[in-house]
Amino acid sequence: MQIDLEFDRQHIWHPYTSTINPMRCYPVVRANGVKLELEDGTQLLDGMSSWWSAIHGYNHPVLNAAVESQLKDMSHVMFGGITHQPAVALCKKLVEITPPALEKVFLCDSGSISVEVALKMALQYWHALGESRSKFLTLRHGYHGDSFAAMSVTDPDNSMHSLYKGFLPEHIFANSPETGFRDTWDESDIEDFRSKLEAHHEQIAAVILEPVVQGAGGMRLYHPTYLKRVRELCDNYGVLLICDEIATGFGRTGKLFACEHAEIVPDILCLGKALTGGYMTLAATLTTKNVADTVCGGEAGCFMHGPTFMANPLACATATASLSLLDCGDWQQQVANIEQNLAESFAPLKQLSAVKDVRWLGAIGVVETHTPANVEKIQEVFVREGVWIRPFGHLIYVMPPYATSKQQIQQLANAIKKGIKETLM
Ligand SMILES: *Cc1c(COP(=O)(O)O)cnc(C)c1O
């Protein structure tokens, strides 16, 4: 049966498009490996990994088997007063692959919720210590999700804080890092952050940021020393550090976690997106024994959060299977190859007059243009060229599945070149 696109236009919200005159939607009927298949049979090379998540590609036999096997036992059961092997196996794995200090795992529904959980943990931590601290310090151009608390620490301009004035708590924003990942570190880059922390540390419960890669807020790749300084300053001022690795986790930047580029350990770590290999929604917030015990030693005696679908067994089993693929698979070589191939095929795009900057790290490639692309128009070119890339604003970017070949990276670069030439020049 044909997908009813007219019903879709009339009744279904899609992300970041109008219901009055919605942008075109492409009907996808199946996905396999690194390809999406449209209803008319067109095969599109996927440059997005479904927003960072499908790192192993689609319809993966190991992940399929994990879902099927778990489905026969139970797809869901409440987590209050009950535990199960899928949750225990996954949390064991998460504790094992993250820094040793992070030993307490809170499983939740989505990235935004894992950020909510992290912020609530930090607030409850200070409350338990008898200190009233209600501010968070974060970076401009950050992105932490679309729920209210997550949005309150997301870039105020990008997330249009003006729309929610009076409702959204106001936090403190430091300038985002200017020193690029491969630039020579400039000590003055940390000054704004340092002075804001110095001025307000007594009210600040935690710093929250995306390590090394600021994703949806601008696709900025910054110097690991910035992160090192942040950790030192948080230690000096006794402020908690939350690292949001929802986009960067599980190998995307060339390290299993982006924090490893700076050899730092956060007090609270948020994971999501690729956790289940892109099969379903699941996220995790990890913290130290100290933070967890302090939170639970307070007035409430526990952490005040418990979503209905907490530790959903289907999602946990799939996540464990995805992590086992990272364990025995060769993601490190694959991501290193993609980085090399991006360097070769994306760098020449810099020569186009419409292009302001080209940058890459691990399996992330970014082309920043002087003027914003017309998403609908440029996507028509991309689809004609057989690729799936979804730009936003001035940014045309790719984060393909790890199995993407050299020739396929070249195909993504060629399509971007055509798209820019036909719609931006
Ligand atoms: C996508 C993302 C989120 C939000 O995750 P959702 O699953 O969309 O709620 C939070 N932080 C970062 C860094 C992200 O990339």
Image (cartoon, grey):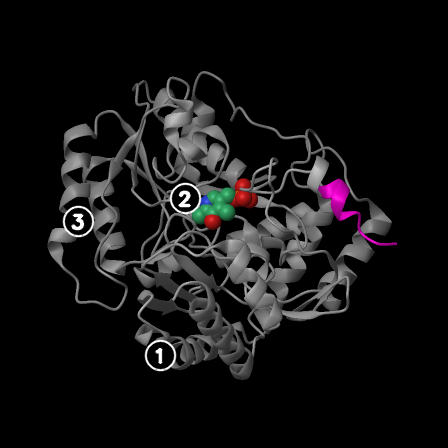
How packed is label 3: few (under 14 Cα within 10 Å), some, or many (20 or more)? many
> What amino acid does circle 1 point to?
Pro
Percent x, y of residue 223: 26, 60
Which residue is denoted by mark 2 in the rendering?
143
Which residue is denoted by mark 3 in the rendering?
190
- Per the image, is 6 magenta? yes
What SS does tag 2 mark?
loop
Kindly identify the residue that appears in the image at 48 percent across and 33 percent down.
116
Residue 408 placement, left or right of 267: right
Q: Where does the magenta region start and end? A: 1-8
Is residue 284 visible to the viewer in this orientation of the structure?
A: no
What SS does tag 1 mark?
helix
Rendered view: 198 above or below 257: above
Kindly identify the residue that appears in the image at 55 percent across and 55 percent down.
376
Cα distance between the residues tagged 3 and 1: 32 Å
Residue 229 placement, left or right of 75: left
Q: Pick whichever of labels 3 and 1 is earlier in the sequence.
A: 3
How packed is label 1: few (under 14 Cα within 10 Å), some, or many (20 or more)? few
Which residue is denoted by mark 1 in the rendering?
348
Cα distance between the residues tagged 2 and 1: 29 Å
> What amino acid does circle 2 point to?
Tyr
Percent x, y of residue 121: 44, 31
Percent x, y of residue 238: 24, 35
Does mark 2's beta carbon lie closer than 8 Å to ligand 1?
Answer: yes
Kindly identify the residue that appears in the image at 62 percent across and 72 percent down.
386
Is residue 275 visible to the viewer in this orientation of the structure?
A: yes
Residue 249 placement, left or right of 382: left
Rendered view: 46 above or below 287: below
